[in-house]
Image (cartoon, grey):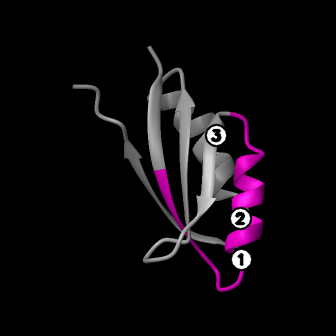
Amino acid sequence: MSIQAYILIQSEVGKAASVTKAVNAIAGVTIAESVTGPYDVIMRAEASSMEDLGRSILAKVQAVPGITRTLTCPVAIL
């Protein structure tokens, strides 16, 4: 079973397009799109475990230039 999560991203003014492009290039990211509202980019990622999600994907996302804040929302399997 894999873990999926939505990551909501706030970026510096004028950086949403470059953040979206950079995030889409990270392995494990299934989609990333620029949006309007309180967040600038919303992405979805998939990993084999929560530890792998944090270490392999989120660490790389948070290192992208222009990102100021992220909020990770794991998908609940009901």
Amino acid of disc 3: Val
Q: Quadrant of the C terminus?
A: top left
Residue 13 drawn at (x, y percent)? 65, 86
How much space separates mark 1 and mark 3, taking CA atoms? 19 Å
Q: Quadrant of the N terminus?
A: top left
Q: Is residue 76 above or below residue 2?
A: below
The region drawn magenta spans 7-27
Q: Which mark is residue 29?
A: 3
Q: Earlier in the sequence, mark 3 or mark 2?
A: 2
Q: Is residue 67 shown left or right of residue 21?
A: left
Q: Earlier in the sequence, mark 1 or mark 3?
A: 1
Q: Which mark is residue 19?
A: 2
Q: Which mark is residue 5?
A: none
Q: Is residue 75 above or below residue 39?
A: above
Residue 65 visible in the current orientation: no
Residue 34 visible in the current orientation: yes
